[in-house]
Image: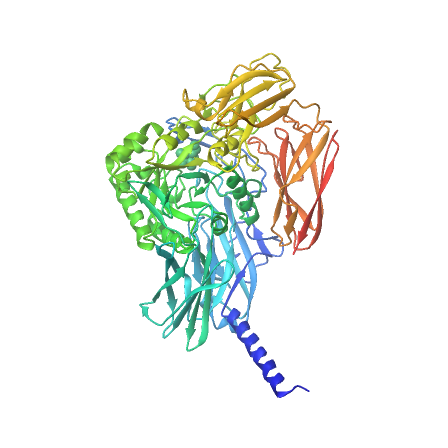
Amino acid sequence: MLTKTKTRLFLGILIFLLAQFSFSQVRTVKDLDTNWKFQKINQEKAFEVNFDDSKWETVTVPHDWAIYGPFDKEIDKQEVAIVQNGERIPSEKTGRTGSLPHIGTAWYRKKFNITSEEKEKKVLLLFEGAMSEPEVFLNGEKVGEWAYGYSYFYFDVTAFITEGENTLAVKLSNKEFASRWYPGAGLYRKVRVIVKNKESIDQWGTFITTPFISTKEAQINIKTKITGENLTLVTTVFDTDGNQVSSNKTTTIFGEEFEQNLKVNNPKLWSPETPYLYTATTQLFFENQLKDEVSTRFGIRDINYDAQTGFSLNGEVRKFKGVCLHHDLGPLGTAVNKSALRRQLTILKDMGCNAIRSSHNMPSIEQLELCDEMGFMFLAESFDEWAIPKVANGYNRFFEDYAEKDIVNLVHATRNHPSIVMWSSGNEVPDQWGAEGVKRAKWLQELFHREDSTRPVTVGMDQVQATMESGFGALLDVPGLNYRLHLYEEAYEKFPQGFILGSETASTVSSRGIYKFPVEKASMKQYDDFQSSSYDLEYCSWSNVPDDDFVLQDDKPWVIGEFVWTGFDYLGEPTPYDEMWPSRSSYFGINDLAGLPKDRFYLYRSRWNTNDETLHILPHWNWKGREGEITPIFVYTSYDSAELFVNGKSMGVQTKNNETPQNRYRLMWMDVKYEPGTIKVVAFDKQGNKAAEKEIHTAGKPYEIVLNPDRKILKADGKDLSYVEVSVVDKNGISCPTSTNQLKFKVTGAGIYRAACNGDATSLEQFHLPTMKLFSGKLVVLVQATTKTGTIELDVTGEGLKGTSVKIQAKK
Ligand code: GAL
């Protein structure tokens, strides 16, 4: 028998638990991820509830329908002059959008349940991106449409929802000539159903800023848009460990917006080195009854741009050591995957990179979350086109009707991410010419300001002369120059801002592990194998090598940083082989399409990563047939000087000097003659003492496969990835840098084989098939967790090679 006290205690606990339960029930957010039906079909009836989709493919969203290929030259073949590249005469181009089958119409259908209780509430359907021109139907009726494939958007579907099973159908249409790179295809980002009370916090209704910061205290300003009357708002701020650090309750509302100011003592500031995050939990009450609850992560940080000091974060002047990224994830296509994004950022962090530009469109929410957590500043871009086309079916078709809506949604959906320190309204828009363009630039900038007064706006400008004359450049908060190094000085003099951003730099081209002779600087250089040299001296007619940017970054305090084109290779835009099939992906990356570092990675690392030493030798030393021929050796290092030895013989000491930009940032032995054996480099510190050394060796015949997973423990969530680097070594364990063996992959246990990629821009092998050739001795296999825990085993074999396997654990 229970005593009275025990009964009371029991009831108390029960009420508490029920209260918790109803607390968590005020709002439900469901990801619509599994069990979608998909078909690439132009079927006008596919929106109907009873439409028979049983024969359609079952897919998981995020999904990219085009990444499975096959690559086909005809898909994006066009006769065109790429005006942005300075071309006047049209010629046949292939591979420009990756030559993957992304063009056409497709349907996605998904059934989901709504309870009787939920039916009485407010229901939103949220898309974090849909490629492209989505038309959304619920239970046989059209609920809305959007245009731009990169926009976040939502519809209030309360009026369309039924109790029990609901049928969602989404039609997507991708036109040809709509993009300058691989745009992907499909529901490639999250789709969510949000169920909340009629009295609730609006979607993206929270806006957190930190207008005052001192070491002692920070002011947290929170504006909250709501629907409903006679409501009370309670906001509580928690630190990373979940301790409550501030709280505020208010009933004072202006229109439909509450405004609160909370004080946080001894604030921990957000920066790339200290990405400290707080959480604000906002609760909406009607007469003590909880109606809604939203948690928002934010950072306390101060950004400032001014003519005297340039850019500063939390009072400290610093430069952007940034990279531009397109949104595709190489072998995964555009289907967003947080694990793949985290790997990219881990690689960039090691390089010393501190900033990302989402070229030339809205980033995924996942990428922003990771940048907040891992410490990257973010330049969030919106458009590659305004009203004047770059490609026939580009954003110009939507600009007039959608530009404002797209900017509003971009700002509202992402403004609480501390990583975002700048907006960009456009990239190399042809509207840089003419008075209309000046007006558009002003209009767009004012839209950003209207929605967010805390961050400046830039445009990546390539028509610098025109923008100096027209006033276009002068009106921008941050004048961004794409390339055009010869105009930096003049632009600095003419523009009123007092600083210049290298919004896009370098566009140096190279293929991982490929070296060409003679070693010389060259523009738009082409070779018979459609590869570019990793001596990092090849660039485009409009661009330059990295060292040229470094000079300006180092010597001009008014240059506030750079965003290198690009951090990783991406699908499409295979310059300088735009006219050469089968080139189908870019050569611009600091890392290749598989995420493997090219030599350039170490050049940037030697400058940007100021915590760790860099000592990297190139090229590889397997040059059968080049015996006795000049084979220059470069060393990318954080040290100022080093001595080089070939088979024990000194080639002399090289010291960085100011003779040329290359001499300033690289150590180069230009006269070395190839002989097989050992290359050794000994680096010296500032006092001339030996500080580090490194060797590379000529390899013998490929003998054995070696596997090196970046992660040995995965989360059994059906999404997590291990990137297993696959290489071959000779009998002595020396890497074979030129091998091209065809390998086969098999994954067993609690995981699946997801894809492979070797970084070869000319490879037509499909990523999802379990076989691929090595490129320059390497490739990467992506192993994906299922929802089962246990051991995953990857087995790699190749003819004439000793095969091997690796075990990875999938855990809850
Ligand atoms: C820039 C452009 C990028 C890319 C790059 C290649 O002009 O903004 O999108 O095309 O050139 O060098």
Q: Quadrant of the C terminus?
A: bottom right
Location of residue 616 in the rendering, given as x and y in whole percent from the top left corner: 55, 28
Residue 230 higher or lower than 531, as above or below: below
Q: Position of residue 150 (x, y in %)?
A: 44, 48
Q: Quadrant of residue 159?
A: bottom left
Which quarter is ligand 1 in? top left
Q: How far from the left and from the top, in percent, is residue 727?
A: 66, 33
Q: Quadrant of residue 258?
A: bottom left
Q: Name the foreground residue: 133 vs 413.
A: 413
Residue 687 at what x, y percent from top left? 49, 26
User: Of residues 596 and 212, which is closer to you in this image?
Assistant: 212
* Frontmost residue, 495 versus 317: 317
Is 556 situated left or right of 292 in this image? left
Quick check: can you spot residue 723?
Answer: yes
The number of discs equals 0
Q: Is residue 646 left or right of residue 193?
A: right
Q: How is the image coloured?
A: rainbow
Query: Is 313 drawn above or below residue 726 in the view shown?
Result: below
Reply above or below: 210 against 659.
below
Which quarter of the rendering shows the N terminus? bottom right
**Furthest residue to the top?**
628
Please report the residue visible at 65 percent of the width from the left and 55 percent of the height from the top: 787
243 and 561: which is toward the camera: 243
Q: Is residue 136 visible?
A: no
